[in-house]
């Protein structure tokens, strides 16, 4: 192995003859991912901004109607946070795996309609069939994504179309049957969602876990397969995302004050995906914060409650579109300031290794073969024949014209 930059000091080599820094980069992500630890400072700063926004909106809600944060109204608000939180967790899990699931909104609405119709059979009997169907549908979606290796948004959009066909069979609102009231366990539902969101974010900051979950994220040609490990993790994420969306839909139906309106459910998809991106999860996958999802969900729910207090009619599409637009800006911030910091010049650590040609890699290192024996090098001077005189200056082969000093009296 040689180095194509003069004066560059080679890093120490291991017993196998490969530089230690190169081995670290290779095993960090064998498929040419960026070496190094993602930076978290951008998430910390943005989460403080979200916390300040949440405090401001909550204060405005308190000033407008303090009863909205007390008693039964507070319990309803907490269940709303848990319901949207489950949808956001579903979107975030799929996004972290770099295979966004656009079917979460239709799945949630289908689950809400099913629970509204079958709730009189009891929460358990109504929930188990929905859970089985959601798991089977998530598995079918996962197999389509990982076996065919197609983008998650395209496969999930096809799945969403299939669920919408089921939804279009309902033309009238469906009143919720049964006596299940999630407000009785509002605090437990909220704490459970918060714990899952924060613990998931904490585990996501661990470098091996972060790269394992986001291993499906393309780093070169997006059509190239990322391996069996990436396919397995992505499949589990899509199945879990679909199940979480179903649970969120059940809470939406059970916590509502009226019948469940039929529709496409895509407005819930836009709101959930936008909220998780606003919380700091990258639209490209892998990168995300710790408290961002929890804060973003609370911010959106409290804002919607504030609009209800003022009797404002704001479409879920409008809120979702605005949140999604903000989430796109956050994605750019996260991808710009959250990627691993490049090694300073002269640090002796090569850049990520990507083959760009024969024997050359993009990190500035060149794979050059060892030089051949010295006697195999071509001579820079013409070879002498056997009849060449000893004095090279008098050799005829060097004469291009008669020598002026070649006279008879020499």
Image: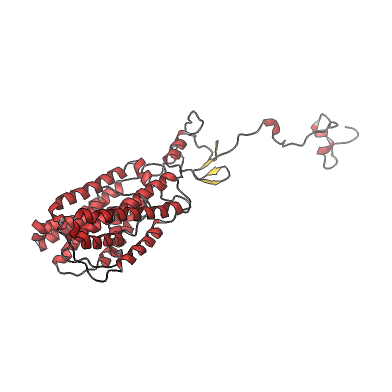
Q: In the figure, residue 115 lies in which quadrant?
A: bottom left
Quarter of the picture containing the C terminus is top right
Between 311 and 112, which is closer to the camera in this rendering? Answer: 112
Above/below status of 351 relative to 172: above
Residue 281 point in image, percent of width and height: 31, 52
Between 11 and 404, which is closer to the camera in this rendering? Answer: 11
Left or right of 179, for residue 96: right
Above/below status of 23 relative to 158: above
Quarter of the picture containing the N terminus is top right
Q: Residue most toward the right?
A: 408
Between 397 and 161, which is closer to the camera in this rendering? Answer: 161
Q: Is residue 152 visible to us here? A: yes
Q: Residue at x 18, y 51 (%)?
A: 189
Q: Residue at x 65, y 33 (%)?
A: 372
Residue 302 point in image, percent of width and height: 18, 59
> How has the structure been colored for display?
secondary structure
Q: Is residue 88 visible to us here? A: no
Residue 141 point in image, percent of width and height: 38, 55
Residue 239 point in image, percent of width and height: 34, 51
């Amino acid at each position: 192995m040689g180095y194509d930059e003069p004066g560059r000091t080679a890093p120490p080599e291991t017993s196998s003859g490969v530089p230690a820094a190169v081995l670290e980069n290779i095993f960090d992500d064998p498929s040419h991912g960026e070496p190094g630890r993602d930076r978290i400072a951008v998430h910390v700063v943005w989460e403080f901004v979200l916390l300040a926004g949440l405090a401001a909106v909550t204060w405005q809600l308190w000033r407008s109607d303090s009863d909205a944060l007390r008693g039964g109204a507070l319990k309803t608000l907490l269940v709303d946070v848990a319901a949207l939180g489950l949808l956001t967790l579903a979107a975030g899990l799929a996004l972290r795996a770099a295979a966004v699931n656009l079917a979460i909104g239709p799945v949630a609405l289908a689950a809400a309609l099913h629970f509204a119709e079958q709730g009189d059979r009891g929460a358990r009997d109504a929930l188990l069939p929905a859970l089985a169907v959601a798991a089977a549908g998530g598995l079918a979606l996962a197999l389509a994504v990982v076996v065919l290796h197609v983008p998650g948004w395209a496969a999930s959009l096809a799945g969403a179309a299939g669920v919408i066909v089921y939804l279009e069979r309902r033309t009238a609102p469906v009143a919720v049957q049964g006596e299940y009231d999630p407000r009785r366990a509002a605090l437990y539902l909220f704490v459970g969602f918060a714990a899952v969101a924060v613990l998931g974010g904490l585990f996501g900051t661990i470098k091996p876990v972060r790269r394992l979950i986001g291993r499906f994220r393309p780093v070169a040609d997006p059509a190239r397969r990322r391996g069996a490990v990436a396919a397995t993790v992505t499949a589990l994420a899509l199945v879990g995302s679909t199940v979480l969306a179903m649970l969120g839909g059940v809470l939406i139906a059970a916590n509502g004050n009226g019948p469940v309106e039929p529709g496409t459910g895509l407005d819930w998809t836009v709101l959930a995906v936008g909220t998780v991106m606003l919380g700091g999860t990258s639209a490209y996958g892998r990168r995300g914060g710790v408290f961002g999802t929890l804060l973003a969900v609370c911010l959106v729910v409290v804002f919607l409650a504030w609009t209800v207090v003022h009797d404002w009619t704001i479409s879920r599409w409008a809120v979702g579109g605005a949140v999604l637009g903000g989430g796109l800006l956050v994605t750019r911030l996260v991808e710009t300031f959250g990627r691993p910091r490049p090694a300073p010049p002269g640090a002796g650590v090569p850049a990520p290794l990507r083959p760009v040609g024969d024997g050359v890699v993009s990190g500035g290192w060149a794979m050059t073969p060892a030089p051949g024996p010295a006697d195999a090098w071509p001579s820079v001077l013409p070879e002498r024949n056997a009849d060449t005189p000893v004095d090279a200056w008098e050799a005829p082969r060097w004469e291009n014209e008669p020598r002026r000093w070649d006279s008879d009296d020499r």
